[in-house]
Image (cartoon, rainbow, N blue to C red):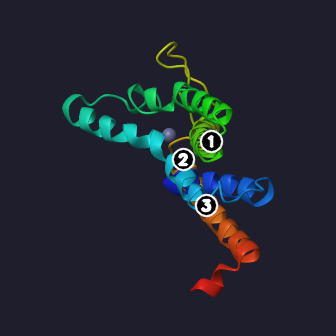
C-alpha cells in the first residue's frame, strides 16, 4: 500500500521527465501541469473519506469501498477520450491537461496494483487485480516508508541537478 508521498512523487517525476525530454512547446505544457499531475496522482484515494464515514456506522472491510470505483479504468478512459477530441480541435493545452490527468490516474492504479490489490474493472466486474507485494503489515509498512524516503531523495537530487532549484531558495 503506497503512501501519499509515493503516489504524488512518482507521478510528478514521470510528468516532469516527459516535460523535460519529450515536450518541445513548453508554452502549452506549463510547469504547473507537473503539480496538477502530482495532485491527480493522489485523487483516487479520495474514497478513503467514504470508507471512514461508512466504517464508523457499519465497520465494513477496507476493500469493500477503497480501491473500487475511484480506481476504475473508466476515469482515465474518459479523460483519454477528452484528450482525443481536444487533439482534433487542435487545442494542445487542453490535450496536455487531459493526458496529464490520464497519466496521474493510471500510475495510481498501477502502483496500488503492484503493492496491493485494486478493482480496475468496477462497476462492470468486481474482480480483484494486483500483485500484493507490500502487505498491510509491519514489514510491508516499513518498506513503504523506506520507498517514500528514497523516492523523495531521488526527486530532490534530480530537480537540483536538472533545474538547480537551490538558486531559488
Ligand atoms: Zn489508491
- For image coordinates 78% across by 56% down, the residue present is 24
Which image quarter: residue 48?
top left
Which image quarter: residue 97?
top right
Q: Nearer the viewer, mark 3 or mark 1?
A: 1
| Residue at numbered disc 2 | 41
Q: How many marks?
A: 3
Can you give x and y, in whole percent of width and height, for residue 149 in the image? Answer: 60, 65
- Location of residue 132 with respect to 23 vertically, above or below: above
For the residues marked 3 and 1, what is the alpha-carbon distance in whole angstroms?
41 Å
| Element type at mark 3 | helix
Mark 2–mark 3 CB contact (< 8 Å):
no
Q: Quadrant of the C terminus?
A: bottom right
For the residues marked 2 and 3, what is the alpha-carbon distance in whole angstroms?
19 Å
- Location of residue 31 with respect to 132 vertically, above or below: below
Q: Residue furthest front?
A: 89
Q: Nearer the viewer, mark 2 or mark 3?
A: 2
Q: Is mark 2 within 8 Å of ligand 1?
A: no
- Location of residue 67 with respect to 46 vertically, above or below: above
- For image coordinates 65% across by 38% down, the residue present is 114
Task: Name the foreground residue: 151 vs 72.
Answer: 72
- Local packing at callout 1 (Cα closer than 10 Å; few below 14, some 14-19, many 20+) is few
- Location of residue 74 with respect to 151 vertically, above or below: above
| Element type at mark 2 | loop
| Residue at numbered disc 3 | 146
- For image coordinates 63% across by 45% down, the residue present is 96
| Residue at numbered disc 1 | 91
The tag earlier along the polypeptide, 2 or 3, is 2
Can you give x and y, in whole percent of width and height, for residue 54 in the image? Answer: 26, 32
Which image quarter: residue 79?
top right
| Element type at mark 1 | loop
Task: Classify residue 19 as left or right of residue 77.
Answer: right
The tag earlier along the polypeptide, 3 or 1, is 1
Amino acid at each position: 500500500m503506497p503512501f501519499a508521498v509515493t503516489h504524488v512523487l512518482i507521478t510528478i517525476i514521470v510528468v516532469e521527465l516527459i516535460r523535460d525530454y519529450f515536450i518541445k512547446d513548453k508554452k502549452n505544457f506549463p510547469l504547473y501541469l507537473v503539480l496538477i499531475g502530482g495532485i491527480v496522482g493522489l485523487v483516487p484515494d479520495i474514497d478513503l473519506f467514504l470508507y471512514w464515514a461508512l466504517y464508523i456506522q457499519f465497520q465494513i472491510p477496507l476493500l469493500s469501498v477503497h480501491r473500487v470505483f475511484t480506481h476504475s479504468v473508466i476515469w482515465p478512459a474518459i479523460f483519454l477520450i477528452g484528450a482525443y477530441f481536444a487533439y482534433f480541435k487542435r487545442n494542445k493545452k487542453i490535450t496536455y491537461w487531459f493526458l496529464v490527468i490520464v497519466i496521474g490516474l493510471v500510475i495510481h492504479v498501477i502502483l496500488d496494483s503492484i503493492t496491493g490489490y485494486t478493482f480496475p474493472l468496477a462497476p462492470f466486474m468486481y474482480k480483484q487485480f494486483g500483485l500484493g507485494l507490500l502487505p498491510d503489515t509491519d514489514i510491508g509498512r516499513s518498506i513503504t516508508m523506506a520507498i517514500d524516503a528514497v523516492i523523495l531523495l531521488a526527486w530532490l537530487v534530480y530537480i537540483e541537478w536538472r533545474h538547480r532549484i537551490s538558486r531559488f531558495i
